[in-house]
Amino acid sequence: MKYSTRLYTILLISGLYFLTACGEFLELKPRGTQLEDNFYQNQQQVMEGLIAIYDVIQWGTSGGYTMKMPLLSTASDDCYAGGSDASDQPGWVAWDKFTLNPYLGPQTGLWQKNYTGVYRANLLLSKIDNAPGLSADFKKRVIAEAKALRAYFYFDLVRFFGRIPLITGAIPTSDLYGQKQVEPAAIYAQIEKDLGEARVDLPVSLPIAEKGRLTKGAATALLGKAVLYQNNNSRMAEAVALFEEINTSGVYALVTKFEDIFRPDNQYNSESILEIPHSTKASWGDWGWVNGGEGNVAPQFVGPADFNGNTYSNGWGFCPVTESLAQALKDDPRFDATIIDGKKLQAEGATYTKRYQNTDYFIRKYAPLKAFRSTVGTAELNWPINEIEIRLADVYLMEAEALVRGGGDLSKAKFYLNEVRKRVGLGEVEATLDNIYNERRLELATEGHRFFDLVRTGKADDVLPGFKEGIHEVLPIPQQEIDVTNKTLEQNPGYN
């Protein structure tokens, strides 16, 4: 089932679902469609409605290829766009070079994906009170997950677009095209409200059969991150308290070997706090930008094109790692677990095609590994490689940053900063913002954090060629959204 690229058409969909599997606990076979009025009649149907929300976080082919990890790496100084040439994925190239306009860029898919998630969360929340036969504990947990997921989608939307419509419930048909944008502060307030309420009723840990569902730790980390990203130094103590809750919980621990974090056979490891699951259990073969399977297409994108050699499978040559990141990691113990050195592979006898913007460096953390290539469906679309969106090292570094920015305990900030460095055998450094931001780049390279880090710290204009302050912090609103609302929606500054 294809979803419209327009928010307002999405809102008109009368609750029809195409349910697919989504990780360990989300293993329902597609059940076709069912009218909203006849749905939510028992606990099983409510669960399917929840799965339909979770399903959206896996999407990477909405309105084009819009997988967060490689796309955000392309927008940053971690990677270039790559591909066969500049016309291969022009939206990626436009964000890489900051030649975006209302018609060109990744904005349509990102808008579609996240508002679909918001719509599904709102729908479930509007129906659950009238669903019969639900146990109290089941109902509380489902509401908590739906709210946390809505916050997750809005956190992406506000970072991608800035001023956006805030929709938290059903909208009368007569009002569909009149939803105006609100300031980011209102979006963040809703995110904080949803996560604050959700984390009370989410479980601290999960049994194996439920891996992939949200936990209290995931909601708490996301809440702390949302506070941090608002750049209000007077609130840094709030962020510290949230991060400290995770860091001292005993639930999470740094993985001993850095390279083991990203092994596809080490999913949901001790360091993982928020992980997006992918598998081959719902194999997929549709090349038409339809979100139907649960595989991950990102590894296919980032692998060396036409690769012939050991360890790796053939990729498409997108997201070649920049020379600047390779240079920054040159003498760092994390290099080999972060970057594939193509020249080294060639010296060992491997071959690959050097494509657009080739640097001979490729993403290693989510590379297409031969041992995990799908044997069902279309292999390129079905990589069973999860995405770790928030992990403990990230939270350590966010707490260190919040402590420094808020005038907190610098000895504690230094401890968390150096715990990350100690894991890979690096010596201690002082807890300064420059050291923390540098550590974030090296530790979290190619994981999709760098672009937003540059934007929120005001460094993007100095680091990213083509970036213009006051414009490129956000994407343009998709032009078709503006057109369908008869310009009720306003374009972001600089994109008119």
Image (cartoon, rainbow, N blue to C red):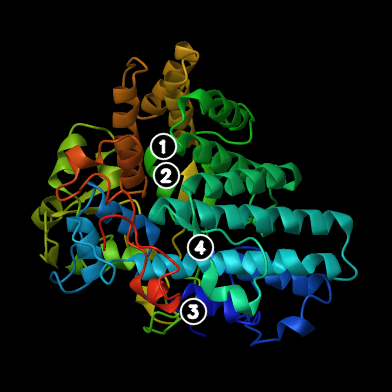
Q: Nearer the viewer, mark 2 or mark 4?
A: 4
User: Percent x, y for residue 69?
Assistant: 37, 55
User: Percent x, y for residue 44?
Assistant: 78, 73
- Front-lying residue, 61 or 361: 61
Residue indicated by mark 2:
260
Please report the residue visible at 33 percent of the width from the left and 34 percent of the height from the top: 457
Residue indicated by mark 3:
283
Find out whether the residues at labels 2 and 4 contact each other: C-beta distance under 8 Å.
no
Q: Nearer the viewer, mark 4 or mark 3?
A: 4
Q: In terms of secondary structure, where does tag 4 sit?
A: loop
Q: What's under tag 4, amino acid-wise? A: Lys
User: Percent x, y for residue 157?
Assistant: 46, 57
Between the residue at mark 2 and the residue at mark 1, the CA separation in whole angstroms equals: 5 Å
Earlier in the chain: of badge 3 and badge 1, it is 1
Q: Is residue 340 left or right of residue 216?
A: left
Find out whether the residues at labels 4 and 3 contact each other: C-beta distance under 8 Å.
no
Q: What's under tag 2, amino acid-wise? A: Asp
Find out whether the residues at labels 3 and 1 contact each other: C-beta distance under 8 Å.
no
Which class describes the residues within 10 Å of circle 4: few (<14), some (14-19), or many (20+)? Answer: some
Judge whether residue 88 can be spotted in this image: yes
Find out whether the residues at labels 2 and 1 contact each other: C-beta distance under 8 Å.
yes
Earlier in the chain: of badge 2 and badge 4, it is 4
Please report the residue visible at 25 percent of the width from the left and 41 percent of the height from the top: 460
Residue indicated by mark 1:
257
